[in-house]
Amino acid sequence: MSAAPLLQVEDLKTHFFLGTARPFGSGRRLLKAVDGVSFSIGAGEVLSLVGESGCGKSTVGRTLTRLETASGGTARLDGREILSLSQAEFRPLRREIQMIFQDPFASLNPRLTIEQTLAEPLRIHGLAQTRTEARALIAETLQLVGLDPKVMERYPHEFSGGQRQRIGIARVMILKPRLVIADEAVSALDVSIQAQVLNLIKDLQRDSGVSMLFISHDLGVVRHISDRVAVMYLGRIVEIGTRADIFDRPSHPYTRLLLSSIPRIVPGRKRVEDLGEPANAASPPSGCAFHPRCKFATDICRTTQPPAHAVDTGHLSACHHIEALQKDLA
Amino acid sequence: MSFLHSVRDIFRGRAMGTAGLIWLCVILFAALAAPWIAPFDPLDIDPVNRLTEPGWPHLFGTDHYGRDTFSRCIYGARMTMLIGLGSVAFALVTGGAVGMLSAYFTRLGNFLMRGIDVLMAFPALLLALVLMTLLERSVVNTIIVIGIVYATTTARILFGMTLKLKREVFIDAAVCSGAGHGSILFRHILPNLISPLLVQASFIFAFAQLQAAALDFLGLGLPPEVPSWGNMLSESRIYVTRAPWLLLYPGLLIILSVFSMNMVGDAMRDSMDPRFKDDIAGV
Ligand SMILES: Nc1ncnc2c1ncn2[C@@H]1O[C@H](COP(=O)(O)OP(=O)(O)O)[C@@H](O)[C@H]1O
Ligand SMILES: [Mg+2]
């Protein structure tokens, strides 16, 4: 990406206070769900964010859509910083950053018809002046996501998970956003329809040229949709690169661990490592957070957090032992 | 049409609830048609016929002023409905607003809900007594006082339910669509609270009956000349041995109406969204 990226995130931090404050003394613990994440997404590009459950992927997405409040860092959309805006200032920008949610059964208001749900963003952002105009746009968008426009009269409970997720996608696409954050958009669906919905997302992305942050815990799902991939571990990005970098030349022990856990993704490669015990974000290990599970770990890993090393242009890995890793791969 | 359907769905197979609903319809009819169905004027004094036994033409007998108990019972239904609906409306509107806004705007909520906690520390009847001694006896004041008492429980319950709803993903989705506070509260949260609110209303209605009767009985509720079931009990209590029917009929009416309202509430609670069942444990 030579042009200025659409989204530029730098040193993003989102910390949560756990438990309730006690009246006397400080009983609150800090959970660093996202702790210094940097990446960029170019126009029309799909960046995937992968990592085990609980590593902070959703929090990244929710912070960028201002559902959570950032504790630090910046995010520039088209050069404009969005994390320091007030909610009121951010509201008009919501049209440009849209989010597809994981659970299609929870993400639609059960009391509203599909038309009411889809008309809401149109009304708020002034994209349709009359009901007729709104219905025309809704019908068009429903067709785009592979649903019969007649469904707009109905209520969410009348639909299957896959259909509901299509409605959720329609709610996003109807605004013609510039960045879509898809948070585990297919994980909650039956395996049989995951591929359909994934293909729909991929097609819509390609046809509209929208940029996308595609969040998933499953590298297998990510493989077909991403231009670039960022691997996250305990609130940080440990490796980022093009799809080929990550899948063919993984340069972080954690990325390799994830790859080895995908069944048959690399023929011939044995599943040598077990996934091991995932670390807890509330009490992260010292130094490199991954060291308790890493077979390359040495003393430096236990004491010092590794900076991001450039393996190649645009391919970064936060590991003290990149050379050893590369020998191991060869 | 869809309203009738949901009424049918709620009461189908629930015999007690249906019986309760029928009884309440009878009371409502009596309240609305009182001037046409009451055989006598409820305020007409007839010193010659004091404390007559039930019979003809005084079906339920007469009281110590010779007033017709049957007619007074029918007019009492008016007061029952008026006080019940009035205090339910007051409790739901004020308590509902406090609970919903407190859960939604957490900083305001910390403040408001502490106030509610203080009010809830008083037993319901004691709180009503304290408030009533500060005010004149009147229909409106009785409605307000009972309304305040049950506004506290309504606020608590709606606080909990709104907190739950606020965490729903569809609320996040609405925020992402750009919805503001008003739209989130009134389009996304409130419509999901309607059925628990109705259940709550039926329980408040039942308890408001008891509360109003108790206030009347203690001489703190409606003005003494108003024919309410509670006032009838209060005035006739010294005649309990000479004219027990004076207590029997209004007493039975109170018990039946409270019981019916509770049965209707149970039926509505049983048929509603399982998510909220735990929140509505009665008042
Ligand atoms: N609102 C919140 N309050 C407190 N902790 C949270 C909150 N949201 C997420 N977390 C915690 O932050 C960590 C990262 O969560 P999340 O971003 O959902 O991970 P992922 O999407 O990768 O599974 C988890 O430990 C989770 O428990
Ligand atoms: Mg998640």
Image (cartoon, coloured by chain):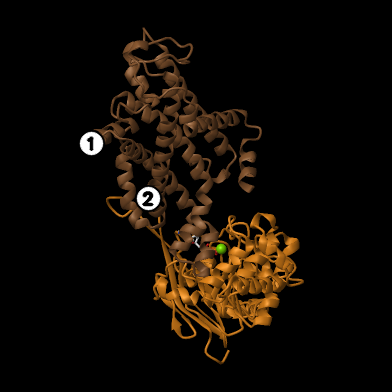
Chain colours: A orange, B brown
Most foreground residue, B255 or B47 = B47
Viewer-nearest of discs 2 and 1: 1
Dot 2: chain letter: B
Work out whether B59 lies above or below A117.
above
Q: Which mark is first along the chain, 1 or 2?
A: 2
Confirm whether circles 2 and 1 share one chain: yes
Q: Is residue B13 above or below residue A66?
A: above
Q: Residue at x 49, y 32 (%)?
A: B33
Question: Is residue B65 at least partly visible in the picture?
Answer: yes
Tell me the tag on residue B98: 2
Residue at (44, 59) in percent of width and height: A283
The percent coordinates of residue B41 (x first, y second) are: 40, 24
The residue that mark 1 highlights is: B134
Q: Position of residue B181 (x, y in %)?
A: 43, 63
User: Is the distance from the Cβ of mark 2 to the nearest ligand 1 atom less than 8 Å?
Assistant: no
Give me the C-alpha separation between circle 2 and circle 1.
23 Å
Return the residue nearer the eye: A267 or A158. A158
Split into quadrants, the picture shows ligand 2 in the one at bottom right
Mark 2 near mark 1, Cβ–Cβ under 8 Å?
A: no
